[in-house]
Every structure is written in C-alpha cells, then in structure tokens.
Amino acid sequence: MAFPHIHIILVRPQHPGNIGATARAMKNMGLSQLTLVAPRTFPAEEAIARAAGADDILANTRVVASVREAVADCPLVVATSARPRTIAWPCLTPKEAASALWVGAQTVPVALLFGAERTGLTNDEIDFAQALVQIPVDPVFPSLNLAAAVQILCYEIRLSAEAGRPPGGEGLTAHKPAPQEALNQLIDHLERVLIHIGFLDRSNPRKLMRRLIRLFRRAAPDANEILILRGMLSAIERPYPPKE
Ligand code: SAH
C-alpha cells in the first residue's frame, strides 16, 4: 500500500530530530513524500539518527522556501492546528481529514500541513488550506509533539485506505480541481482588481481577502472555471469600449 500523491509538509521545523521522527512515522504507515518549508537545519545527522532506517525518505525530501511553493501542485490542502482559531475554517476530525485526503489522492496530489514546534502555522499559511484538522486532546495541554501529530494523521490515512473506500465515490473526485498555484494566481489577480476598482481597502486587505479565499477554496474550481474568472478580471481591468 503506497501513497505517492499524499504530501506531508513541515513548515519551518526547528528541530532536526523531529524531521527524522516524521520520516520514520511516515514510513511506518507507507507514506513517502516529505516536503520541508524553510527548515532551520537540514540535512542533519540528528534527523538521520531519528529516522531509524527511514533515511530514504530524508534523501528524497523536497526543500522549498514558502508554503505557497510547497502546495503549488496540490488542489486539496488540509492544515493542522493544536488550538482553535478565531477565524473559523471548516474543521475536520482526523478521520474525516484522512478520508478526504485519501479519496482526493486517487486523482490529484494532496497535502497535509504541519506547523513549527513553538508557533504552529500562521493564519496566512492556513489560508492555503481548504480545511483544518485538530487531533482531540486534553484542552489543558493540547499541543502534541510535531512528529507525534504526523504519526496520528498518517495512521488515520492508512486506516482509511485499509477500509478501502471506493475511489470515485466522493465529491472531490467528481471533478478535477485546478492546481493550487492557478487558484493562488486567481486570488492575487482578484485582489489587484478589487483594489483597482476601490472595493478593497488597501490598508486592511486581509479581512475581506481571507473570506474570499475561503469561498474559492471551498468551491475548488477546475482549470476552465479559473480561466473564465481570470478572463472576467482582465476585462474589468481594460478600459470600457465606447458605447455604440
Ligand atoms: N503552540 C503551537 C503548537 C505547535 S505544535 C500552536 O498553538 O499551534 C507543532 C505542530 O504539531 C502544530 O503546528 C501542528 O501541525 C501539530 N500539532 C500539535 N498538536 C496538534 C493537535 N492537537 N492537532 C493537530 N495538530 C497538532
């Protein structure tokens, strides 16, 4: 059982030991695709030691500079959080998240985002995700070790796959959402146009944009739909043709 389309992404990991322990946790469950966003120290001896035989995953690990780059090819992205966030992203249980990721991975690359040990993910980074997942824990001590959180979610992905949910049965596979980067470019374009037409307040763009980003991620438009929307935005940017 392999999961070549499921990407585990660690954002700004601080401790190389956690990178190694993550590789081990993934390999135990049959996952292989690890991406690091701006790791503090990598490659590192400590990571190899903690990988305990999963060093093939470390050898193939992709290192990138931003979350945007990390998820560029992934139409489905789920972010993890140890704490509830003030802006309500749709929140999934580990089982729901694992099932959505596994079903999605039948047709498109999918990603699961993990935050840095001390700070977790920023809201701007969670904006790249369609949903959040929180592992149920005791609320007085909710923050799991990073690799432990990876272990639990990879285990749930494996359980979903073993339960053998028939691919093709759920919404995400009914159509093919465009790659994430196409959607990000649409959002950038929309932001530019909304500022240009005076609808968006330049001094506080995030509030409105965050809501619009959530709307677009939920809709998961396909490549054609994005082309239509980009075309509309370009038409708004052009001077209006003179009236006949
Ligand atoms: N103080 C940070 C905790 C970061 S723990 C915060 O409040 O967000 C490091 C990472 O481990 C988190 O970003 C998340 O990816 C994962 N993690 C830890 N506990 C988790 C939990 N209960 N549910 C989901 N992910 C968790």
Image (tube, rainbow, N blue to C red):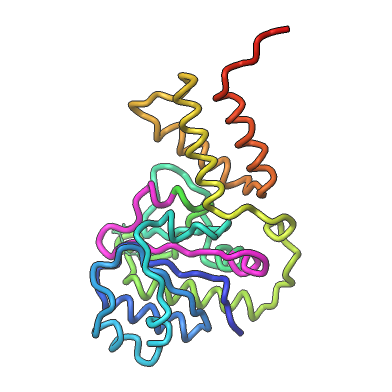
Q: Position of residue 143 (x, y in %)?
A: 32, 64
Locate the N terminus by quadrant: bottom right
Q: Position of residue 216 (x, y in %)?
A: 58, 42
Does residue 75 show up?
Answer: yes
Q: Which residue is depicted at the point 63% across and 45% down? A: 219
Q: Which residue is depicted at the point 45% across and 39% down? A: 210
Q: Nearer the viewer, residue 231 or 32?
A: 231
**Left or right: 234 with respect to 12?**
right
In the rendered image, the vertical position of residue 188 relative to residue 164, given as above or below: above
120 part of magenta stretch: yes
**Left or right: 207 with respect to 220?**
left
Residue 226 quadrant: top right
Q: Position of residue 232 (x, y in %)?
A: 63, 30
In the rendered image, the vertical position of residue 37 relative to residue 186, given as above or below: below
Q: Which residue is depicted at the point 65% across and 41% down? A: 227
* Residue positioned most to the top: 244
* Residue positioned most to the bottom: 53
Q: Which residue is depicted at the point 62% across and 74% down? A: 160
72 part of magenta stretch: no
Q: Which residues are magenta?
A: 101-126
